[in-house]
Amino acid sequence: MHVPFVDLKAQYAAIKDELDAAITKAVSETAFISGRYAAGFESQFAKYIGTDHCVAVANGTDAIEIGLRAIGVEPGDEVLVPANTFIATAEGVSNIGATPVFVDVDAASYTIDPQAIEAKMTPRTKAIIPVHLYGLPAEMDAIVSIAERHGLKILEDCAQAHGSTYKGKTVGTFGDAATFSFYPSKNLGAFGDAGAIVSGDKAVADRARLIANHGQFEKNRHTIVGRNSRMDGIQAAVLSVKLPHLDGWLERRRTRAELYNKLLSSRLPVPTAPEYSRHTFHLYVTRVRERERVVEKLTAAGIETGLHYPTAIPFMEAYAHLGHTPSDFPVAYQQMSEIVSLPMYAELSDEMVEYVCENLLAALLNQAAA
């Protein structure tokens, strides 16, 4: 049996007619950049998240850069970032001239460890970026409390957590602003790059829109130096079709995760969520020893896997100049040699999950015997 890591063709096939009609309509109207399709999606997505404002941009990395500028982060400021996340989170900080300051992660949740935050703060600290990694919300009560105590801004990175909730509120509604990626493999994915910034603060949203549109609110009047980061009309049309299906897809992901947990929990650490959080399982991540050997066995059985992330950001070449050592981030350092992501998507069948688990457990038994 072949089990792909993600199967975008299966999702497309399920709603092909809706998607094809929306794309055809957008093309026939030559609605290629922003326009009514982007505005329509902004309204729909803001309502889904439960916030007042949404600014559609070109991709999730742009969303982080623009979001940081919109909440007032400036060159020379420091921004606290979890050590284990995709590089875009830190990259966005660096690209606006600020400095990412890395914080170790919690051993069980993989998200930023609130107990490690204050030790990393300096007089230059301006903001915190909690990442709702793999679909599990970070511990926002503790993070918000720290931010309020020290007068810090919060930019939530929700790139992997569309529809995740924390204590009854959707992620993206806790900070001064939040960012989303709609990369095709996300829980809500476009047919190319796309992103968004959401905020309950009109001034923040207006500044984000100004930055993303060349610093202009009206044509040929540029009040600041901005940039070009606008969502394509076709991507907005695709996302508007997919959004009503999202909750159903998320529920299916959770049932797949429950089956994985049932079959693997006796042998491996499995992802769980506190009762007050809704994990949406953008990724299903576990940890194994001698990972390369285990992955090799799964690959031979036709099972695709992923590594998210094999190198924690502080240890990447891009940030080698910071001079970090493993003792600076012991949890993230240990996990980066053990984590492995198993196939996870709404269309994954019970038989596929069982096949993955059967082969994974067999690989572990062989490992123990060796």
Image (cartoon, helix red, strand yellow):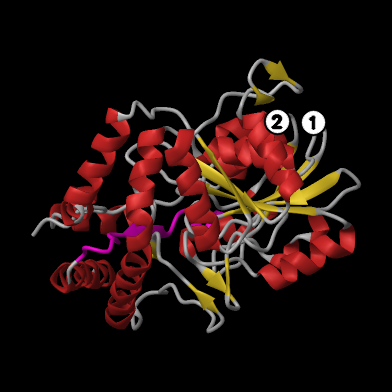
Could you say which disc has been placed on residue 259 in the image?
none
x, y percent for residue 233:
40, 34
x, y percent for residue 323:
70, 38
Is residue 206 at all visible to an observer of this figure? yes
Q: Write the start and end of the magenta stretch as one range.
A: 333-348
Ranked by sequence position, the earlier of labels 1 and 2 is: 1
In this rendered view, identify the residue nearer to me: 123 or 255. Answer: 255
Residue shown at 72% from the left, 49% from the top: 202
x, y percent for residue 296:
23, 52
- Give residue 168's quadrant in the image: bottom right
Asked if the magenta segment contains residue 168, the reply would be no
Q: Which residue bears the numbered disc 1?
A: 75
Residue shown at 65% from the left, 58% from the top: 104
218 in relation to 333, above or below: above
Left/right of residue 269 with respect to residue 137 in the rendered view? left
Is residue 315 at all visible to an observer of this figure? no
Q: Amino acid at mark 1?
A: Pro
Residue shown at 45% from the left, 28% from the top: 33
Could you say which disc has been placed on residue 96 in the image?
2
In this rendered view, identify the residue nearer to me: 306 or 235. Answer: 235
Crowding at mark 1 (Cα within 10 Å: few <14, some 14-19, many 20+): few
In this rendered view, identify the residue nearer to me: 368 or 134. Answer: 134
